[in-house]
Image (tube, helix red, strand yellow):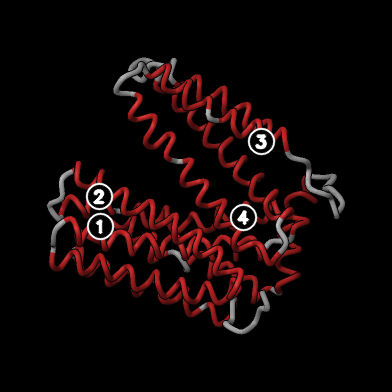
Amino acid sequence: MLSTQVLLLVTIGTLGFLDPLTQLWPIAWLCLGIAFLSATQDIVLDAYRRQILPDQELGLGNSIHVNAYRVGGLIPGSLSLVLSDFLPWETVFLITAAFVLVGIALTLSIKEPPCTHQQPATLQAAIVEPFNEFFSRQGVQQALLILAFMLLYKLGDSMATALATPFYLDMGFSKTEIGIVAKQAALWPMIIGGIAGGILMLKIGINRALWLFGFVQIISILGFAVLARVGGGLWLLGLVIGFEYLGVGLGTAAFVAFIARTTNPAFAATQFALFTALTAVPRTVASAATGIIVEGVGWENFFYMCTLIAIPGMLLLFKVAPWNEETY
């Protein structure tokens, strides 16, 4: 955790001193390094969170983490862009990198979680054994169903939001309206949904949350279809986006908690890396394919298709997260 944060501090701060016109390849390699370090830090944080949270607190704990991640994204996504209008890029990147110091301070203030298992001594023990443990613990058939569920549960939702900004532009909204209304209407309902979902999971458990929040996700996609059909003003845009991202927040809170519960704390890092990489596949595929689909069927039919695509993931809940199976 500490080593990746120190390296991120250095690499992010260095970016502003490179010229995109004459040093494009050094920038590309540096960005690749930042992406690698960021992903490594995410895996370590996921593993640490899994080791310190008891199973009954996975829902709330992971929802807090997800929402903190989104709020933290306002630093490079908003603050840095605003600062770039007034300051040179060198200073902007140094200020952005300085926020990593918060993470470093927190890393130095926490303790290593208690180790209840033997640390892997070889590369095979660190990589192969976590895979074997997952399939042996779940059984091959159940393990494959769980992996299929991770692929499909958020697929319809990911496709519906992959081209959100081009959709708003096609509906006639200006970039200023999208920036002020759409982005705010997405962020805060998503945060509220994540927090509310985490608290609710303490009462109803992860399985039932996956069912309830999954239905909210499906219904919220239809709001985009309504917007595509009737158009409308900013009030409808804000309402549709707010409801959609409330569903995103709820669904993500339950989904991340399910992933955490599926891992074995003894192999948390490797198994978390496997599962999170797997869940990223639908987003990548969606981003690549949705534009072509929209051109062929139009926006309204596209959102109806996204709704149908979300159903298989819900049906897998009968096998991977039955309504009455868990007690927390």
Q: Nearer the viewer, mark 4 or mark 3?
A: 3
Question: Would you identify the image quadrant in which residue 92 lies?
Answer: top left
Q: Where's residue 134, x and y in %?
A: 71, 65
Q: Residue at x 62, y 40 (%)?
A: 41
Looking at the rendered structure, the kind of residue marked 4 is Leu
Q: Residue at x 38, y 51 (%)?
A: 187
Task: Give the structural element (helix, strand or loop) at label 2.
Answer: helix
106, 273: nearer the viewer? 106
Q: Earlier in the sequence, mark 4 or mark 2?
A: 2
Marks 1 and 4, how far apart in space?
A: 36 Å
**Left or right for 7, reference 296:** right
Marks 4 and 3, how far apart in space?
A: 26 Å
Looking at the rendered structure, the kind of residue marked 3 is Leu
**Left or right for 227, reference 85:** left
Disc 2 vs disc 1: Cβ atoms closer than 8 Å? yes
Disc on res. 181: 2
Disc on res. 274: 4
Task: Give the structural element (helix, strand or loop) at label 4.
Answer: helix
Marks 4 and 2, how far apart in space?
A: 36 Å
Q: Which residue is mark 3?
A: 106
**Other residues around mark 1 within 10 Å, as few (<14) / some (14–19) / many (≥20):** some
Q: Residue furthest bottom?
A: 324
Q: Where's residue 317, x and y in %?
A: 54, 78
